[in-house]
Amino acid sequence: MQKIANLSEIISNYDAVFSDVWGVVHNGITAFETSVAALSEAKLMGKKVILITNAPSTSEHVRDHLKNSIGIDADFYDDIITSGDVAKLIIDGWHDKKCFHIGLRDIESQDVQPDYSKLVDLNLADYVLCSFLARQDEVELTDYMPLLEQMKQRNLPFVCSNPDHLVDVGGLLYYCAGAMADLYQNIGGEVIYTGKPHGVIYQHAQAKLAALKADVPPSKILVIGDSLGTDVPGANRLGSDMLFVADGIHAREFEKEQQENNIFSDAFMTFIEGRAKSLKVNVDYYISQLA
């Protein structure tokens, strides 16, 4: 694992970038200006930049959120693919199937999820959709086990439109659909994952490159992200190098355990290396915050 200070140190080795959004470009509230500048510079150098995110909303909503809520224009990337986009493609193909929904419903994910009129009680559902849950300090995942057991009894497929377990929203941690999907899978339920680290979203990202007339092999794609659970194994499976952004979800985890915030300390390096080893994933590069 090589520590770098700037993306410019390695970007000449690649023709395209697949960059995470939440935790790399912004924290849900505030933009990371150095990250935007680094990706903008890569794009000016002729590198194709695809934002690849486990957001359960469509790419159009992510684009609007970046511009209107975070305050970032679209000139630092070429295209976006979201876990919500992939979920929508699946759901749109299930014209006659009825949905039971778990989690918060908001305007940003409304176009991925069926209309309220198409939502039904569990006993009438053909599948279950989970998009987003609630704050970590407000719910206990184990409270959902009776519901998950009922779903399993009916052998309902579970569409997980955000495979992340946690997301940091301005310093507050929220459970994502992936946390519940794992519980369901652990009791033998069928889960359809539509985002990272699963291959389908990377196939769509590669299709985005093809649409840009960029025939880029995985070995020439640099994947950037802050999650050892999604971004890193996704890059490994794709066969691409991985740039791990330390000041993300695992920095929060480390700070909670160690009561310090020096993410380039020897202790943090040991922490990340240990986590990567336990998850059997490989990190090629390591950076504090994308710059």
Image (cartoon, rainbow, N blue to C red):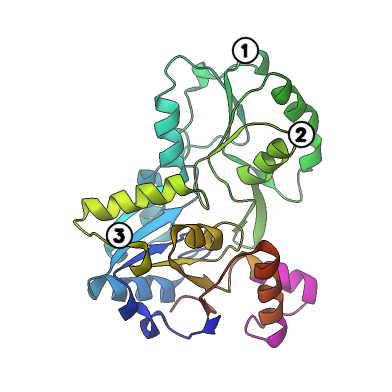
Residue 144: image tag: 2
Residue range in magenta is: 251-267
The reply to whether residue 22 is visible in this rendering is no
In the image, residue 95 lies at what x, y percent?
A: 42, 18
Q: Which residue is mark 1?
A: 124
**Residue 167, image x, y percentages:** 61, 55
Mark 3 secondary-structure assignment: helix
Q: Earlier in the sequence, mark 3 or mark 2?
A: 3
- Tell me, yes or no, whether the highlighted magenta stretch contains residue 98: no
Distance, label 3 to label 2, CA atoms, is 39 Å
Quadrant assignment for the C terminus: bottom left
Element carrying mark 1: helix
Question: How packed is label 2: few (under 14 Cα within 10 Å), some, or many (20 or more)?
Answer: some
How far apart marks 1 and 3 lie (CA) works out to: 42 Å
Residue topped by disc 3:
74
Camera-side residue of 223 and 29 = 223
